[in-house]
Image (cartoon, helix red, strand yellow):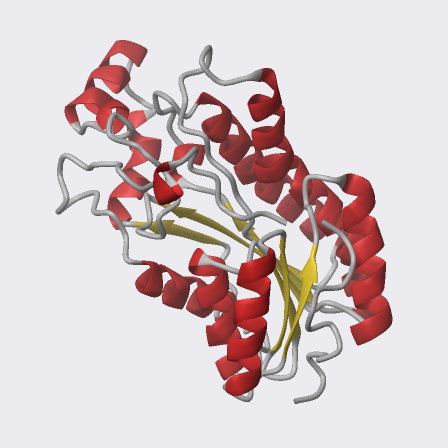
């Protein structure tokens, strides 16, 4: 099992949603939590809440889509706290537009935040984990990383990519015999506001997930070194559907309303659906390191 108490846990996109909930839950288990985000107000709020609750936490403003900034702020984290024991790549963004309606800039940003950022954060912190002989990398993918969804072409492409990233990285780690654990998480839509307006046709089989429950399950999966966590259980059936001919696969997806889920999408605050992701330099609470209260 991965040791939570006394560990330094870095969470990208940790100022809101399940990132924030995970930060609180890990801190309650005795971890020192390092939170990256670009939401200044969210960072200030969670820093205050963590301090008021006696939790060990520090916040940094970091844009994970910017490779240079990721490496720069990672060095600040290392200088302040030594090493990161558990890295949780949670930051995400969604525009919810059809492929041709999305701008070039939105497509690039979606790939940069949802996929490429994992490359930079893992390259920044994996070498220290290898030297320490201990570490855990958590990849937050999505059920949309297992099946294509209309109006989520860019998002699905990125989430498919990070699912493959986790799998290939796991293979490399095993081959090199490093004592590094990996966990990939693929949830269906979560009620964080990021996917506000989405609908599900069969709520019994594919419910909109409760964010508290999702955060709890991720924390437990990390503790128990689970390699893969899919939510709800129905998501596991997607691999079986791949045995069907393409036309039958598509018909089944439409039957379950997969391609209709985004029809009422508005996103957080009725806007473009972006969720805070992570720009460099220590944040307002960087004076409060995980190692001390």
Question: 220 or 266: nearer the eye?
Answer: 266
Number of marks present in the image shown: 0
For the N terminus, the quadrant is bottom right
Eyeballing the image, is 56 above or below 277?
below
- Identified at 37% across, 22% down, the residue is 151
The picture places residue 128, in percent across and down from the top left corner, at 82, 63
Please name the residue shown 61% across and 30% down the image: 109
Instruction: Give residue 207's position: percent from left, percent from top.
Output: 21, 47
Residue 75, x across and y down, in percent: 85, 60
Please name the residue shown 34% across and 59% down the image: 211
Residue 172 in the figure: left or right of residue 156: right
Quarter of the figure with the C terminus: bottom right
Task: Left or right? Give the position of 35 relative to 147.
Answer: right
Image position of 98 (left or right of 264): right
The one of 61 and 258 positioned closer to us in this rendering: 61
In the image: residue 170, left or right of residue 78: left
Above or below, 5 against 237 in this view is: below
Residue 44, above or below 146: below
Residue that appears at 74% across and 57% down: 177
Residue 263 image offset from top left, x and y in percent: 25, 25
Q: Quadrant of residue 116?
A: top right
For residue 175, say whether it is visible: no
**Quadrant of the rendered structure where residue 101 is?**
top left
Is residue 239 at all visible to an observer of this figure?
A: yes
């Amino acid at each position: 099992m991965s040791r939570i108490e006394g560990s330094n846990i870095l969470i990208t996109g940790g100022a809101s949603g399940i990132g924030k909930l995970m930060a609180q839950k890990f801190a309650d288990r005795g971890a020192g939590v390092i939170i990256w985000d670009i939401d200044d107000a969210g960072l200030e709020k969670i820093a205050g809440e963590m301090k008021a609750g006696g939790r060990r936490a520090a916040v940094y403003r970091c844009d994970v889509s910017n490779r240079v900034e990721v490496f720069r702020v990672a060095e600040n984290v290392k200088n302040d706290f030594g090493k990161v024991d558990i890295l949780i790549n949670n930051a995400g963004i969604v525009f919810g537009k059809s492929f041709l309606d999305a701008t070039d800039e939105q497509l690039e940003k979606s790939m940069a935040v949802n996929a490429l950022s994992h490359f930079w954060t893992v390259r920044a912190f994996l070498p220290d984990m290898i030297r320490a002989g201990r570490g855990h990398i958590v990849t937050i993918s999505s059920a949309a990383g297992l099946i294509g969804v209309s109006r989520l072409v860019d998002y699905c492409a990125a989430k498919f990519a990070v699912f493959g990233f986790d799998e290939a990285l796991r293979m490399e780690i095993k081959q090199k015999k490093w004592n590094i654990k990996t966990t990939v998480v693929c949830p269906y839509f979560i009620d964080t506001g990021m996917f506000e307006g989405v609908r599900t046709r069969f709520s019994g089989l594919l419910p909109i997930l409760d964010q508290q429950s999702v955060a709890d399950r991720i924390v437990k999966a990390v503790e128990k070194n689970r390699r893969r966590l899919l939510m709800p259980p129905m998501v596991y059936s997607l691999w079986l559907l791949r045995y069907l001919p393409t036309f039958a696969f598509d018909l089944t997806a439409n039957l379950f309303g997969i391609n209709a889920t985004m029809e009422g999408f508005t996103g957080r605050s009725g806007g473009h659906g972006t969720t805070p992701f992570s720009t460099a330099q220590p944040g307002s609470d960087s004076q409060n390191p995980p190692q001390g209260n």
